[in-house]
Image (tube, helix red, strand yellow):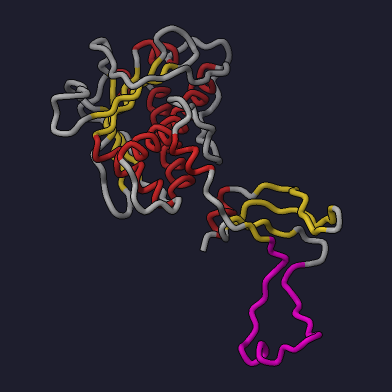
């Protein structure tokens, strides 16, 4: 992440906790895209100056999301995305899930799902700074009022496109909250290794219902081996192929050819089964993607 210095508002340019909070949100947003769409964008932000974009009356329609944090009155963030940006983000995520034709309404709902997950991580990061648990409240599609002047421009760079920058605005109450004093020493803000749970910015969308209905192949990998073609041609009934896995090592649970978990083989009512012993880390899952 890259925070610029020019054109900066006082809070976001000078307050270390505010910069850390925005850095953490940008990292979480990249992780959510990586987990949902299979592509991790480059995310850069810089403090912005001038008037906030309005929902109407601009070249592109802006979709504003207002997300309050349950940490006190007026502790709120807002995120704005121009229509080309949220349409691109939603469509690429749905296409990664196997959809070819994407309706704009579904792309919009998917963007709100992505945004909700990243803001949920931001709420937890706020809690790490102030030393107590902070979660997301009920959000709404609404721009900030005229009292909000601290905001940043967030550029997303994907392999195939660079959509219009997002706008992230922080309320004065949020900036005052993370400026202290705190009830106990602040803890370091770290981006979660796994994609955070959604903040559910709206009632459960048809997009999520659609994704939950997608069928994926599940397979169990006992091991692998590479052998020359001449040895393959020699295989007959009764031949033994030795795998690269020890008999005591756990087997791998693969979903859509991606490593998800490891476990031990058991028998349940005469059928083979796998008892999950370990959920694969994000790094292991990425290394297993074909």
Q: Residue at x 67, y 90 (%)?
A: 231
Q: Position of residue 71 (x, y in %)?
A: 49, 12
- Quadrant housing residue 256: bottom right
Q: Residue at x 52, y 25 (%)?
A: 124
The region drawn magenta spans 220-245
Q: Residue at x 76, y 54 (%)?
A: 274
Q: Position of residue 234 (x, y in %)?
A: 70, 92
Q: Residue at x 62, y 52 (%)?
A: 260
Residue 174 showing in the rendered view: yes
Residue 43 is covered by the magenta coloring: no
Give 77 or 138, whichever is nearer the viewer: 138
Q: Position of residue 2 (x, y in %)?
A: 33, 38
- Per the picture, the main secondary structure of the magenta-coloured stretch is loop
Q: Is residue 42 above or below residue 46?
A: below
Residue 46 showing in the rendered view: no
Give 200 or 43, whichever is nearer the viewer: 200
Residue 242 is covered by the magenta coloring: yes
Q: Quadrant of the N terminus?
A: top left
Give 13 or 55, whichever is nearer the viewer: 55
């Amino acid at each position: 992440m890259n925070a610029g210095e020019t054109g900066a508002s006082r809070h976001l340019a000078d307050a270390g906790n505010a910069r850390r909070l925005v850095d953490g949100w940008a990292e979480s947003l990249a992780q959510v895209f990586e987990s949902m769409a299979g592509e991790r964008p480059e995310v850069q932000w810089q403090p912005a100056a001038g008037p906030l974009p309005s929902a109407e009356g601009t070249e592109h329609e802006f979709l504003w999301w207002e997300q309050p944090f349950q940490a006190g009155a007026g502790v709120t963030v807002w995120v704005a995305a121009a229509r080309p940006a949220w349409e691109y983000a939603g469509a690429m995520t749905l296409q990664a899930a196997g959809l070819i034709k994407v309706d704009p309404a579904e792309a919009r709902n998917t963007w709100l799902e992505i945004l909700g997950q990243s803001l949920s991580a931001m709420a937890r990061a706020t809690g790490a700074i102030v030393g107590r648990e902070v979660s997301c409240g009920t959000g709404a599609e609404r721009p900030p009022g005229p009292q909000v002047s601290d905001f940043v421009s967030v550029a997303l760079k994907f392999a195939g496109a660079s959509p219009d920058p997002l706008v992230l605005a922080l309320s004065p109450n949020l900036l005052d909250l993370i400026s202290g004093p705190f009830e106990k020493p602040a803890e370091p803000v770290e981006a979660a290794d796994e994609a955070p749970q959604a903040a559910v910015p709206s009632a459960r969308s048809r997009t999520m219902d659609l994704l939950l209905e997608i069928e994926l192949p599940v397979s169990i990998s006992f091991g692998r081996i590479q052998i020359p073609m001449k040895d393959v041609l020699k295989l007959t009934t009764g031949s033994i192929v030795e795998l690269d896995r020890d008999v005591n090592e756990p087997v791998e649970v693969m979903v859509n050819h991606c490593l998800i978990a490891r476990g031990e083989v058991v028998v349940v009512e005469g059928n083979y089964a796998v008892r999950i012993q370990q959920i694969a880390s994000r790094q292991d899952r990425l290394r297993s993607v074909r």
